[in-house]
Amino acid sequence: MPDPQRLHSAIGRVYLVGAGPGDPGLLTLRGAECLARADLVLFDGLVNPLLLRHSHALAEQTCRVDGPAGRVLRQDEINRRLIEAARSGKTVVRLKGGDPFIFGRGSEEAAALSDAGIPFEVVPGITAATGAAVYTGISLTHRDHASAVAFVTGHEDPTKSISLDYLALAKFPGTLVFYMGLHRLGAIAQSLIEAGKPMSTPVCVVSRATTPRQRTVTGTLAEIASLAIAAELHAPSLVIVGDCVRLREQARWFEDRPLFGQVIGIPRPEEQADETALRAVELGAQPVLLPTIEIVPPESWGEVDAILPRLNEFDWIVFTSVNGVHGLLDRLWESGRDMRSVARARFATIGPSTAAALEKYSLRADLVPSEFRAEALARELCPQVAGKNVLWARASRGRDVLPTELTAAGANLTQLVVYQNCDVDQLPVSSLQQIERGELNWIGLSSPSIARSLARLLTDEAKVWLGNKTKLACISPVTTAAAKEAGLPIAAEAKEYTWEGLFQAMIAANRETI
Ligand code: SAH
């Protein structure tokens, strides 16, 4: 989408956008709009990369918080990049963790843009303090405990003229929230106690707030530093000091999600992983994408294009995957035709996701079998197809249950390859490393071919964790059989043959092992 605000000018605009504290759902609508129209996104190390799905632009990370591998861009270099890109006519989004103007140097970037005469807009974000407080069940201004809240830096710039007055902070009639204070927690607590804050004041340290890796440690001001060290908390962490911390247990919700903190491998091709990854986040888990196949168009569209003008000859069109729906119907649209070409046909789908994909084209499935597998689809479709013209929009490879059964039932079957599923040569390096470090709790296997591919793509270092630290769940008995044949140990099997069923199987298996 072009940026409507810049149509009359050769210079682009810069949007300084708050990305929120980590949960990809905590981005503002305005932030999502800006991302959708960006030509370039520069995001900082605190930003959840899942937010980039709102954008089709080139995205570059400007620094990294964890690990020495990343390149760190200096602030003046970032300012220069923003100005140069805008001058070349680009719409630029500068995506910053939390709120851009709270301990975020966003105001310095805005000042640099203003000096350079670049038009800009600032989009606020949910800052870490409110994100962390709400996701741990703490009300920073609970009326029985605090009449004010202060955001305090725990990492003072020694060159600054104003420095923290701990006597004033100790007397402050409300909640103190320290940003960037984890590594100085001992000194902060000590300074507050020396300034008269009671040693028994409750404190909560929240690490990686609003993400599946959120961890909280609570204790008194006197003991919190040693508790935090013992718990080996990681950055980014926030320190909340005040009586409101006491009421946390009554209002906690996030950490009680059914898959909270679980790291789950999702071996789906990039284009399809979105919904599943977001559902994993909703259940409290951290998704790790492990695409084993790549979905690409057929080698040639020749056969498909030859069928498109004859689509109204078919009594049934069968879809056994979301890709099949997109492959056929997008090509139909691109060829200059529209849904009237399939007006005569009835539609059979293998399951609810495929039916939902049809709905996006305002088409209803006439048949969704009660069990979401090829055998069930064949069983329910066969009685209706004798002497009928049936089209199956299929992948370049797959099981042959459907053609065998439908042909035996007297259907006049046309098989049309509308997409190819190609094996990838390797898993994304960062995901593979996570498996090799034993960081995954679960991997979901959603088809026999995915099970076989994964067995091929996992290194020996990764395989040592399978069955103990990293468990495997299969979507159906057919997949379980294929996985076992490929030598993979299986810990759970879905009752309903969908990704939701897989998640539920993981939840049930986790309960059993507690
Ligand atoms: N502009 C950001 C803050 C940047 S300063 C905002 O508004 O949130 C970086 C500090 O923010 C970190 O040192 C940490 O104290 C805090 N922080 C950011 N994200 C956090 C998170 N997910 N959990 C806990 N603290 C976080």
Image (cartoon, rainbow, N blue to C red):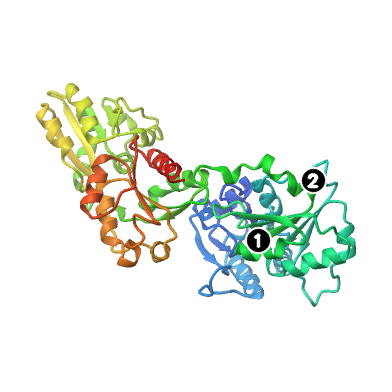
In this figure, which residue is indicated by the disc labeled 1?
Answer: 237
Q: Which residue is mark 2?
A: 141
Side of 345 relative to 125 (left or right): left
Q: Residue at x 48, y 55 (%)?
A: 56
| Residue type pointed to by label 1 | Ser
Q: Position of residue 331 (x, y in %)?
A: 30, 43
Q: Secondary structure at mark 1?
A: strand
Q: Is residue 481 left or right of residue 494?
A: left
* Dot label at residue 160: none
Q: Point out the tag, 2 or 1, that comes first from the N-terminus.
A: 2
| Image location of residue 378, percent across then percent down | 20, 30
Q: Nearer the viewer, residue 348 or 210?
A: 210
Amino acid under disc 2: Thr
Dividing the picture into quadrants, the one containing residue 329 is: top left
Assign ligand 1 to one image quadrant. bottom right
Within 8 Å of ligand 1, the CB of disc 1? yes
When the figure is inspected, residue 302 is found, relative to residue 72, above or below; the finding is above
Residue 347, position as x, y percentages in the image: 28, 29
